[in-house]
Image (cartoon, rainbow, N blue to C red):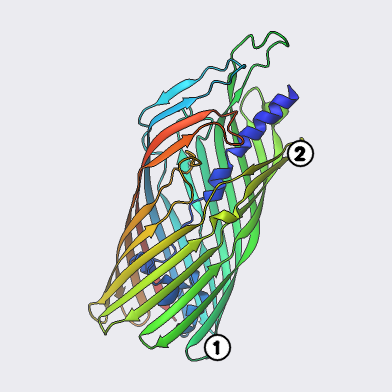
Amino acid sequence: MKKLLTLTAVGTILVCSDALASGFNLKEQSAAAQGNAFAGATAGAEDISYSFFNPAGLTRHKGTKVSVGGTWIAPRSRAKRAHADTIIPGDDFPGFQNSGYTGDIVHAAVAPAMYMSHQLDDRFTLGLSLNVPYGMITKYNDLWAGRFHGTLSKVTTVTVTPMVAYKATDELSLGAGLQMQYIKATLRNAVRIPNPGIPGVGPVLPGVEDKARLEGDTFDIGYQLGALYELTPQTRFGVGYRSQIKHKLKGDIEFDGLMRAMANQDITARLTTPANLTIGAYHDINDKWSVMAEFGRTYWSSFEELRIKGNKGLDNVTEEKWKDTTFYSIGASYKVDDQWKLRAGFAVDQSAVGQEYRTPRIPDADRLWYSAGVEYKYDEKWTFNVGYTYIRAEKGKVKLNGMHEGDAARGTLRADYENDIHILAASINYNF
């Protein structure tokens, strides 16, 4: 019985891996860049919020500046025609189940962002940022067909980054930062407890269900690098790099019912959030029009496994199948007068996982971004930005066949998803 409980606990924990691996990489860190679909975010340096993508751009900002903003992210994801086969051969666990339309399984949230910069002299500028670079919430009914693969997934991060920028020459600036990141994850799902039965006879009663909840957090450190090259006063190019961060979450797993006494335990989970490389270009055509472009690469393939250890002997490794993704965007801005500027942009954003490994915790898919924004410069001290994006995602499919490592105790799951996202960002910038 102890072995059965341990194996069931392993299966429970492993479903958490997808939520932590993908985690929703939140690109929405600048209301101004949002208006251009983040085209030119690495090269633009239009205000200090662009330092999230490239700290070298801080050398373009004189004196002392503060930027405070937030992004309202309203995703919509609807699961339809979900079908699960939870029968375990030889254990007599009942479970051909279907769920029709589940309604929205994601919820709106606000991601805050704050930036500060101070010019020390003609060469050095210091900066500090507070961001939420990863975050997600998905929630299903506790009785839906895919409950063994997940019912609640919540991941929150907070990152503080001190930065320094150095103007090496009149054309070249360099920057670096230290990512100090706190991450917390809460996940919940149903678990199956097959009846072990009588030796030589088999199960005499059908299996039963329990519910499990996992929670863990950690604080770890990575780094950020950037370079900005100003070819002419009208044209500049930038490159930015945010390192992977190796996390070791510590927490516990708790069960609601029969397994509570024997299977509750403290756990640790190792995972790696991906590195990001971005390359951008910005060009002023004339006094009115500017154009920009961005290329980004997120190295999800660095997340090779999730290792789980518990203080009651639990030790398991799960291989993941994430792949590197690419982000492309183009944009344009029009300066109406000395106070008003209009922005627009378009982007293509790839999904990190195919349908054969996609889970209901994060049913993402390839996406198209349509963005617009407006800037209002009240005076030399106050500037306001608003950016809006509509993201249309391809229809996603979950096709878990129960053959992947860790899926044997959860069964198969097939489901269709429709996803889209509305994003509204706003910021206030003040120059001292």
Residue identifier under label 2: 311
> Residue 358 at what x, y percent from top left?
48, 42
Q: Within 10 angstroms of label 2, few (less than 14), some, or many (20 or more) residues?
A: few
Can residue 45 be seen at all in this image of the molecule?
no
Task: Measuring from the top left, give residue 128's x and y in whole percent.
Answer: 54, 72
Residue 400 placement (x, y as % from top left): 50, 34
Callout 1 touching callout 2 (CB < 8 Å): no
What is the three-letter code of the residue carrying label 1?
Ala
Q: Nearer the viewer, residue 67 or 310?
A: 310
Q: Residue at x 56, y 62 (%)?
A: 275
Instruction: State whether residue 267 is above or below residue 112.
Output: above
Q: Tell me, for residue 168, which label it has, or none.
A: 1
197 vs 158: above or below: above
Q: Within 10 angstroms of label 1, few (less than 14), some, or many (20 or more) residues?
A: few
Question: Left or right: where does residue 177 sit relative to residue 388?
Answer: right
State whether residue 267 is above or below residue 283: above
- The image's mark for residue 80 is none
Which amino acid, mark 2? Asn
Is any part of residue 95 visible from this angle? yes
Quarter of the rendering containing residue 223: bottom right
User: Could you tell me which residue is drawn at 60 percent across and 32 percent down?
Assistant: 212
Which residue sits at x=64%, y=16%? 195
Q: CA distance from mark 1 to mark 2?
A: 52 Å
Image quadrant where residue 10 sits:
top right
